[in-house]
Image: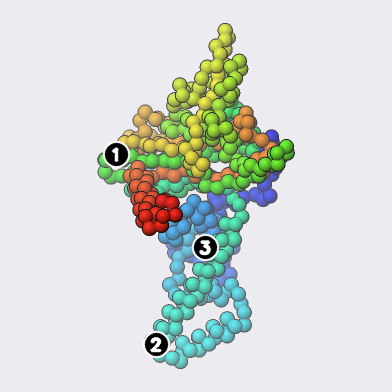
Amino acid sequence: MDLGKFKPQREPEKLEAYLIAANDPDGSPQLRPIFRRKRAGEVLTRQQVSAIKKGRKLLRKEMKEQGLKRRIDFEITATNMGLFFDRNKLFWPFFLWLIRDNTVLKVLTTTLLLTTAVTVSVPVIQYVTQYITEYIQEFIDRIVERIVTEIEEQEVDRFTINLSDELFNSGFVLSEDYTFEETASQLISVPAEGVPCTSIRDIPQNVHTVDGRYPDNSFYAYTFYCRYESSTEDPIDYHWSLNITQETEHTVENAETGETTTRHLSDAIWVMVFEDNKMMFYAKLGEDGEMETIPEQTVTDMGYIEAPMMPFAREPENQYEIIQEGEYYNYWRVKPQNFVSDTIVAEGLMMGVTPFNMESFNPEVPFDPENPNGIHKYTIVIWLEGDDPECTNALIGGSIGMNFVIKFADEVIDEEEGEEGEEGEEGGEGSEDSSSDESGEGN
């Protein structure tokens, strides 16, 4: 199977391009000298205004895809990225509404309002102004929401890394670069498209040494860093999880029996997670419910001549097995860890993270996992495993989106306890129902 033959219909928008354009002062002046858009008091060019608008729409869409729907979260993130305008206190929503659709009705309405403002008393002006401002703002919000919804309907699969609000507010930041010259609470990476099937043995040995997106389209790999900045010296624990956010379904029909089954891209996807340069790899259970080893457990006379990526394995004794010893080389079997669930690929716990100490930090020295200094490094590698028996032509054209979420360990415990409490309440209601209805079944 070669997914490389199937190219995307369009080039995905890149948020990074809008960020660069938004900070480029070279360009044409705005056409409206009275109501010019500004950012931090600085008048922007037409090209900057356009880039900020497009960047905000794309950022809003990507944050909603990851469940970050609160407007305050969006505004904070957009402001940190420079995707914002200074607010004109009162009249900008009204003029925006007017410009969007220059109908005769709106022009007449504007004339009437201006005439009324001159002739009526100040209290009436204030009342009318407040009413119109609230009405226009609601009208604009509806339009923006509709536009965002339309954009969200277009499939764009991205890999994102998110810090919880609590972690971000407590001093945690993310960066693609070990020097942390640019920091954020969320990182977004463009997807790998049209990827072919490959093998674990073809993953480069240096895959975890390149910061950011690894430059190879036969698989997906992304390296980033998480740093704890705090004035306190108390260590903390955090939990991370790698999640499947969405994937397409494929219906496959058996030509002989006529039975249909549903296939997902995750059936054939394998994943590596490097944490501080130590690696674990994962795969879904096979169709028979057993571990998806390569070669299969029944094979005893062949295998990998060299154990792929074994020098970086965190638990080599659990993920590699000698099938047969030879005079010149051995045959090896690889044994991926199972996905945690249908939607969670892997999860882990980082214990005793101490705050970053700037005085002992040298950006010229490579990251040392033995002396992390409040920094921890992660590399996520995702590929279509060609030797997986479920990697078939039925998956051609499939897509999948994933995110990496980091939270306080206590947050995860609270969420689990909350879910258990909800289940208990449902169970209690079920008990009451079953006691009052002899034919009913308890929950």
Residue type, numbered disc 2 = Val
Quadrant in which residue 221 is drawn: top right
- Alpha-carbon span between mark 3 and mark 2: 35 Å
Density class for disc 3 (Cα within 10 Å; few <14, some 14-19, many ≥20) is: many
How crowded pointer 2 is (Cα within 10 Å; few <14, some 14-19, many 20+) is rated as: few
Residue matched to label 3: 44
| Residue type marked 3 | Leu
* Dot in front, 3 or 2: 2
Percent from the top left, x then y, of residue 13? 60, 52
Q: Please report contact status of discs 3 and 2: CB closer than 8 Å, yes or no.
A: no
The answer to which of marks 3 and 2 sits earlier in the sequence is 3
The residue at 41%/44% (across/down) is 406
Residue 208 in view:
no
Picture quadrant where residue 108 is located = bottom right
Rendered position, 135 above or below 353:
below
The location of residue 124, given as percent across then percent down, is 41, 87
**Is residue 241 shown to the viewer in this render?**
yes
Q: Which residue is mark 1?
A: 235
**What's the residue at 47%, 61% (across, down)?**
84
- Would you name the residue on which mark 2 appears? 122
Instruction: From the viewer's side, name the closer residue of 418 and 179.
Output: 418
Of 323 and 183, nearer the camera is 323
* Residue 104 percent across, percent down from the top left: 62, 82
